[in-house]
Image (cartoon, grey):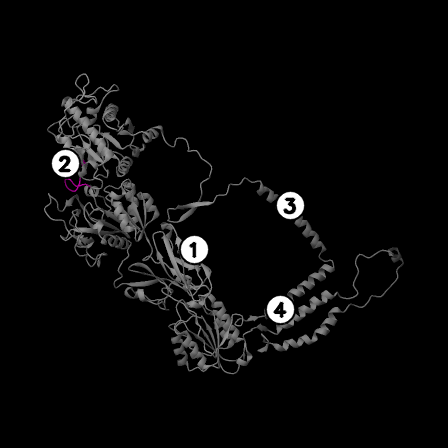
Amino acid sequence: MTAIGPFLLGAPLALFALLALPLIWWVLRATPPAPKEAELPSLRLLEGAEPEEETPARTPWWVWLIRTLAVIAAILGLSQPVWAPGARTTEAGGGPLLIVIDNGWASAPRWGELTNAASATLDAGDRDGAVHLLLTAPRQLNADPAERLSRADMARRLSSLDPQPWATDRGDALARLDASNLTPARIFYASDGLETEGGAAFAAALAARAPLTVFAAPPEGPAVITGLSAQTDAVTVRLARADARGSARAFVSALTQDGSALASAEAVFAEGAREAEAQFSIPAAALARIARFNVTGRAGAGTVWLWDSAKRTRRVGIVDTGTAAQPLLSDMHYIRKALEPFASISTGDIETLVAAAPDAIILSDVGQIPRADTERLTEWVENGGALIRFAGPRLAAQGDDLLPVTLRRSSRAIGGALAWEEPQGLAPFPDTSPFAGLPVPGDVRVRQQVLARPEPDLARKTWARLTDGSPLVSADSRGDGTLILFHITAGPDWGDLAYSGVFEQMLRRAIAAGRGEAVEDGDGTYMPQLSLDGFGRLTRASPNAAPVRASEFATMKPSEIHPPGLYQGPSGSRALNIGAGAAPHLMTQWPASARLLGDAEARSLRLAGPMLAIAAGLLALDLFIALFVAGRLRGLTRRGKAAAKKTGGAVGALILAFAFLPQEPAHAQGGYELLPDGSYRAIPSPSTRVVPLPAGKASEKEIEAALVMRFGYVETGDRTLNERTRAGLRGLSNILNMRTSVEPAEPHALNLETDALELYPLIFFVVPENAAPLTDRAVARLNAYLRAGGALVIDTRVGGDPAAQTDVSRLETLLAGLDAPQLQTVPDNHVLSRSFYLIKDYPGRFAGRRLWIEKTSEPGATRGDGVSRLFIGDADWVSAWAVDENGRDLYSVDGGPQQRETARRFGVNLVMYVLTGSYKDDQVHIPALLERLGEQNETPEPLLPGGNLLDGGPR
């Protein structure tokens, strides 16, 4: 090529055509010969008329100027000019040219500039000279630098190159160059500008071989994502840059697997700082959908960070059992504390949690699951979910099919006054257990557990044991998911595991193992699943990608056989990221003999195409002007005006139509709605207008129950029994009004399937004879009521036979599905016997009957707040309490007035026990109780006529 200043000419002889410009100018401005003149007599009529148009005597100057410029542009285009300010023809002597390109991950952001600079150097020098190529990113089959290419072939090779998603190895490239025995005449080095893998030594070695020209294109702004840290609802992404001069800002996007953006955050580099952070605050459900982070507008594998399942925050759902009123006393409190360091927690009912598709769902002491929820949970587990359950009194009393082992229908008490062995500690975890390797705390003791029935494969299902060999944690697969059971409570009621640090680790590993992942990799391998290319695009792993040993994954560096991407293995999916721990720095030490090109000098632009396009455009303009002057465009102009009028009228009518359309007021986004598939949908903010509640939202009965405390009773099909129950609760309410600060209003009859049960602190269910079993909906609502802290009193009224013992077995059919723990008779010295009055018996119309309440682990021990929510008896209490509207007793009592008074006192104690809990069980009250027991009444109490006390009770 011939150089003229910053321009190179591929066909310089074409410029000789410029010498013909004067002749071309003379031809373009020539006019046709003048016409012959002939006089016609009729033309005298036109004398004095001014012609509207005149034909010029010669071509206008602006017309021939356009034509001249078109010819000049065509001549210049045919000379094949190239604008290359960095080219030097003095360097284009004989001998081969070696082009060296850094094609690692750091070259991707400015890859186009690097290849353009390499292409520009081809334009200088001999067109037939040999060209050789050396790439610094190693591959299994590297191109031989000794391969001779023509400049045309090299141009095609450069246009087909892409950066590789791994780092350069300049030492390997130099060894390949030495092995080729190539002696270049000059070397052009397109560098990524980073001082990595011996960059300065590599440049010095190139300069020692031949004259060296260098174009360095380091990444501008953030060069790489170096890591991230995650919390339950936040992520911090760390970025690094090579050039610390000045301040800079960048935006990081959080993307899903399919590339949808969920959020973005800004990272700001301060003056002189090489690192910055981008802070994300994202809801936990949306956070679980994030698959990768990338720097917006920065292409390359270094600016993409893949987020694997091993490091992503777990999403755990806890089934709400209605213990929010006393959170510190519930098992859910200990579960939450153990999960908070590594999981995002959501609570709700089973239907809501299954729809949210968390990593695991936890049930704490749930014995009976409604049929519809059982089907939902079963399907969810079989599709890969992990169901973790904790034992307790309810599960010990009645289990279900969603358990890994078959349980005995009782719990085993270890230690205590009535136990035959001491509390047990934890045995070392089996090698096949997910808990293997965890330290076994020596101070943990288990006092009670649910036992599994002996099975041939019980040992295989056991993940943790007590020192006596009984299972502590068992698990079994169900479809693609896992059922896991802790045989003790999640709280400290049955053992001390909740107090130890190993409890958190056991939950973490149980969730991972339940999802088919292993916390410890062991000797497994990770298979490549998805890979990043040099521009940071996620694609299927190539056939050349090889598996990675689990033990080597943490220290593995990306390469051609182990490209950056996602790998599937024992711990689920793990990400191999190119930027982990990277610290990019600019290369500032270049050889003194090297010629450094700036950004402008390294560029080249072929001008042949643009010049020919300009020539064609000028000729088209000349043709248009000629047609316009000749009047050939007038008809087209008139038709265009008519069409414009019609179009303008239609557009105007359309604008008016839209202007008068009724419009909805604009809403700002006020939040997001969780959809069943786990995604989020933006919802409009509520209007500022006051919108009245729809009529009928709350019934009059519900409003009355919410405003004034009252009791409820289950309405049965026996009308007479309903009236008896109503009268009994009316009498109990009257006694409470007279003797205590509790002032209940008139009781309400309740339908278990429709009424709001949570508005009533105490519900009485007086069972009629031959009662039909409760419906599934009624049982489910009763379960929710009891878990929320409500109390249920069941009276079978069959205690008329003194020889017969109280039998609760007939209630199993009636209350099938009720999630109730094991029952026991009220033990001696129970707080129920002293919550208001000091009593020893709990009679109703019949005396000597037993009262059943929820069972505790041993006499005197309490669970949670120690208050039983279920009371079952057959003493016919409502008949003993029943009064008419005038306050007169309606039914006789076997033991007379004294027994009726004791029954009333039991009713008062029952209500006070339900409302106030077990505070009277505190040791602080013992002195006052002892004093009350020993004091003597010195002043007689005032009496009413008939010998009754003022409160209506007998003396």
Q: CA distance from mark 1 to mark 3?
A: 48 Å
Question: Front-most of 167 and 813?
Answer: 167
Task: Identify residue type, mark 1.
Answer: Ala
Q: Please tell me which of labels 3 and 4 falls first in the chain.
A: 4
Q: Residue at x 36, y 65 (%)?
A: 581
- Classify residue 744 by image quadrant: top left
Q: Please tell me which of labels 2 and 3 falls first in the chain.
A: 3
Task: Identify residue type, mark 4.
Answer: Leu
Q: CA distance from mark 2 to mark 4?
A: 106 Å
Magenta-colored span: 853-862
Task: Identify residue type, mark 2.
Answer: Pro
Q: Nearer the viewer, mark 4 or mark 1?
A: 1
Task: Identify residue type, mark 3.
Answer: Gly
Give the vertical position of 250 relative to 204 (above or below): above
Quadrant showing the C terminus = top left
Element type at marker 3?
Answer: helix
Residue 612 image label: 4
Looking at the picture, how far across and down is residue 109, in whole percent?
Answer: 46, 65
Q: CA distance from mark 2 to mark 3?
A: 94 Å
Quadrant showing the N terminus = bottom right
Please name the residue that numbered disc 1 is placed on.
265
Please name the residue that numbered disc 2 is placed on.
827
Q: Residue at x 18, y 23 (%)?
A: 953
Q: Residues within 10 Å of mark 4 (few under 14, many from 20)?
A: many
Q: Residues within 10 Å of mark 2 (few under 14, many from 20)?
A: some
Q: Please tell me which of labels 4 and 1 falls first in the chain.
A: 1
Cβ atoms under marks 2 and 3 closer than 8 Å:
no
Q: CA distance from mark 3 to mark 4?
A: 42 Å
Q: Residues within 10 Å of mark 3 (few under 14, many from 20)?
A: few
Q: Nearer the viewer, mark 1 or mark 3?
A: 1
Q: Residues within 10 Å of mark 1 (few under 14, many from 20)?
A: some
Q: Is residue 33 left or right of residue 146?
A: right
